[in-house]
Amino acid sequence: MNNYLAQIALVVRDYDEAIDYYTRVLGFTLIEDTPQSDTKRWVVVAPSADPQACRLLLAKGVGEEQQSRIGNQTGGRVFLFLYTDNFDAFFQRLQEHAVRIVRPPSTEPYGKVAVFADLYGNLWDLIEPGE
């Protein structure tokens, strides 16, 4: 049996601003943007076009409860872990786009890591695994 996580829903304020951020700032690929109704879209982005890579379903928050979770789906803990094979280049990209760095780069036993906040305040670990 071969199981893997395919997608994670990320509650966002607006589809277009989220697409812009994740594609332009983080360099993700827009995989799908399909209208479901007049107000709902199926929007999927991924850090890689690899079909096995975990993707983000950008889900527009509807109603007070969902909107209250935007930017804080995990109660303030790091939510997503983005692995890279070129930490320095990706970190520079974050700086060029004025992304808020929550914890500066450090070298840990498992690799190089920094924590950044996305457009909505969700916390991400950027990690280049060690040898």
Image: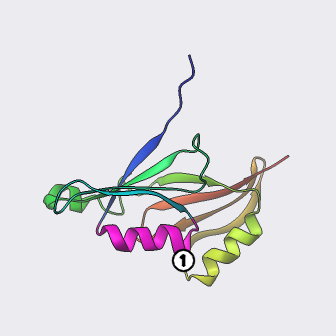
Residue 120 visible in the shown view: no
Up-down: is 21 above or below 33? below
Where does the N terminus fall, quadrant-wise? Answer: top right
Q: Secondary structure at mark 1?
A: loop
Give residue 86's quadrant in the image.
bottom right
Give residue 11's quadrant in the image.
bottom left
Predominant secondary structure, magenta span: helix
Dot 1 amino acid type: Val
Q: Is residue 26 magenta?
A: yes
Residue in front for this viewpoint, 119 or 15? 15
Up-down: is 99 above or below 6? below
Q: Position of residue 35 (x, y in %)?
A: 26, 58
Q: Position of residue 58 (x, y in %)?
A: 37, 57
- The residue that appears at 53% across and 45% down in the rendered structure is 54
**In the picture provided, is 114 more to the left or to the right than 77?**
right
Task: List the single residue furthest toward the front.
Answer: 34
- The residue that appears at 22% across and 62% down in the rendered structure is 67
Task: List the single residue furthest toward the top.
Answer: 1
Q: Which residues are magenta?
A: 13-27
Up-down: is 46 above or below 121? above
**In the picture provided, is 19 more to the left or to the right than 14?**
right
**Crowd rating for badge 1 (residues with CA inside 10 Å; few <14, some 14–19, many 20+):** some
- Give the residue number, with chain letter if any, for mark 1: 99
Residue in front for this viewpoint, 126 or 107? 126
Q: Position of residue 8 (x, y in %)?
A: 42, 46
